[in-house]
Amino acid sequence: MLRLMRKFSWSYVLYTLLSMAIVFPLFNQDRISGPRPLDLTFAYYLATYFFMIIIGSIWSLEEMEKRFHGNRFLQTLPIRSGEIVGAKLSLVFLTVLIYVIFHCAAFLAISSDPGFFGPSCTLIILAGDFCLVTSALLYLGVFRFGFDRFRPFLLFAWLCFMILPLPLHIFLLPRFGLNIRDIIDVISSLPWIPPTLAALVLFFGISRLAIRALKTQAL
């Protein structure tokens, strides 16, 4: 499975490095000395950006596999469906883990104040949990229906995370007398351990369904 992971890793490495190249300059002295240096909105937008990176990685990899018939070729080799699914979802898991660790370390570099560091890390960890489950579901769709048929759903998911936050903030939340900081305060105050455990159980459970879906597609 490690060889397959190396084969599939280029997309995740590319998008992860691109993410860090864009985000890292934001962790600078201006951020620390700004008028609201410990504003959790910063962590919230990083969490939202995370989904687009993962979905973009999945899309890019599957597009390339389709173009060169990679998945079809692998299914002709003595490679189990579990190895193919396991390699792709292991890359998702490692990407999420690296993203969470990187940003938590960056938050600690900004401030060790528990009022900032703890809630910011909670936002990123919960975003990682949601991203794990979402990615597993997307891959289940890819393996169940094929990339060509499922591609519109990947596009829809990517657009949701890129476009929907803006009208949500501008139009929907004000109707209920809320603003984005209210939502951030609620999410960042949640305990992260139970959702993380639940996300891991769901992730591995959906992975098993994805293996069955790929086996069915190969028949």
Image (spheres, rainbow, N blue to C red):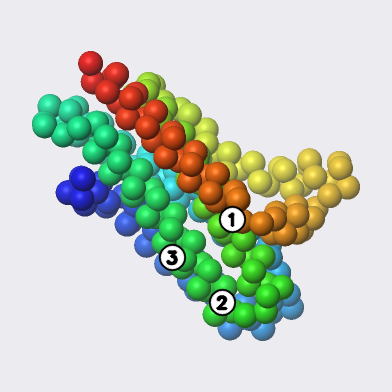
Residue appearing at x 12%, y 27% in the figure: 76
Give the alpha-carbon distance from disc 1 to disc 3, as whole Å. Answer: 25 Å
What kind of element bears circle 3? helix
Q: On residue 20, which mark appears?
A: 3
Q: Is residue 120 above or below residue 151?
A: below
Q: Is residue 190 left or right of residue 196?
A: right
Element marked by disc 1: helix
Q: CA distance from mark 3 to mark 2?
A: 16 Å
Viewer-closest of 21 and 79:
79
> Relative to 188, is 113 above or below?
below
Q: Residues within 10 Å of mark 1 (few under 14, many from 20)?
A: few
Which is more foreground, mark 1 or mark 3? 1
Q: Are marks 2 and 1 in contact (CB under 8 Å)?
A: no
- The residue carrying pointer 3 sits among few (fewer than 14), some (14 to 19) or many (20 or more) residues within 10 Å by Cα, namely some
Name the residue tied to disc 1.
193
Residue 108, position as x, y percentages in the image: 56, 77
Query: Which residue is at a point 37% across and 32% down the rendered structure image?
Result: 208
Q: Nearer the viewer, residue 6 or 207?
A: 207
Locate residue 217, reporting x and y percent: 28, 19
Quadrant for the N terminus, please: top left
Type of the residue with mark 2: Leu
For residue 199, say whether it is visible.
Answer: yes
Query: Which quarter of the image is occupied by the C terminus?
Result: top left
Taking the spot 71% from the left edge, 42% from the top edge, the residue there is: 167
Q: Amino acid type of disc 3?
A: Met
Q: Label 2 belongs to which residue?
A: 108
Asked whether the viewer can see residue 67, the reply is: no
Residue that sits furthest to the left in the current view: 77
Frontmost of labels 3 and 2 is 2
**How far from the left and from the top, in percent, is residue 192?**
61, 56
**Sequence order check: which comes first, mark 2 or mark 1?**
2
Percent coordinates x, y for residue 103 in the rendering: 51, 67
